[in-house]
Amino acid sequence: MQQFLDKLIDLGTAAGLKLLYAVVILVVGLKLSSFLVKRFDKSPAYAKLDPSVKSFLKSGAKVLLYVLVFLTAAYVIGIPMTSFMTILASCGLAVGLALQGSLSNLAGGLMILLFKPFKVGDFIEANGEQGTVEAITIFYTILHSPENRVVTIPNGTITSGDVVNYWTLDKARLDIPFCTAYADDIDKTREVVLAVAAARDNVLADPAPQVLLDKMNESSLDFILRVWVEGKDYWDARFGLAEEVKKALDANGITIPFPQLDVHQK
């Protein structure tokens, strides 16, 4: 009986030491991984990379280091790597189904880096959301919206849908719709609105601004003010022009009509 107790104590001590070593490896390994990622982030070679590639590599390196730390801790506890890999292989189908969404997002991140539909700093519209791209990680793309919201979109969703990049080119076209009454002079309307566009510093002179008659509705003439701006000035120009066009039309006695119906009685 005493021999059995002594053997049990020895086994418990050995198992306790292994568990203690594993905990130390986890704590030290995770802290060391974070330190290495930070050093990698500050390295001169890393600083020269494209911001989109930088965010992707940083998140990928962190995941890889964490996986290595957990595998090392499992090995110290006594789980043989061959058995561990066999278990993973036998559960491959279940793991693959469980991680289907994550693998799709990983593939989407690689496609974004490969085909470059957008990069960090671009203003895009994807999955019904608009915002400036702050980071492209291995699984998600992070946007900063004009409403000061942080929007996280899975990469798989982005690559499987439509993406509008407003800043791919140096210039962006901006269409400002407005309407006038049938009684108002078209030439005067065009002159007043073009003067508004010419007075703004963030509206480009080439291509020249245009005022185009778009539709003749039942109660109004619908126009479009079409201007070109630099990508960084898109939102300032859009909201500023809309307000200034309204004020200029009011100041010149040009009516913005509301829907109405004329009834003639015989």
Image: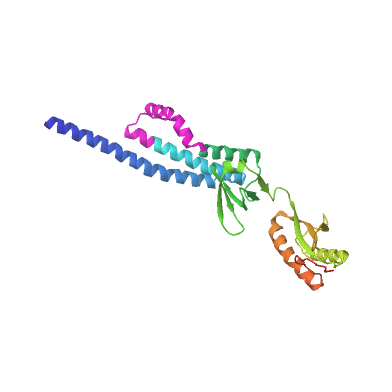
Front residue of this view, candidates 194 and 262: 262
Front residue of this view, candidates 37 and 112: 112
Query: Which color scheme did the rendering employ for the protein?
Result: rainbow
In this picture, residue 101 sits left or right of residue 145: left
Q: Main secondary structure of the magenta part?
A: helix
Give the vertical position of 200 relative to 1 (above or below). below
Residue 56: x and y, percent? Answer: 56, 43
Quarter assignment of residue 245: bottom right
Q: Quadrant of the C terminus?
A: bottom right
Point 55% across, 54% down: residue: 150
Residue 175: x and y, percent? Answer: 76, 56
Residue 243: x and y, percent? Answer: 72, 66
Front residue of this view, candidates 83 and 48: 83
Quarter assignment of residue 111: top right
Residue 31: x and y, percent? Answer: 41, 46
Point 40% across, 42% down: residue: 29
Region in magenta: 72-100
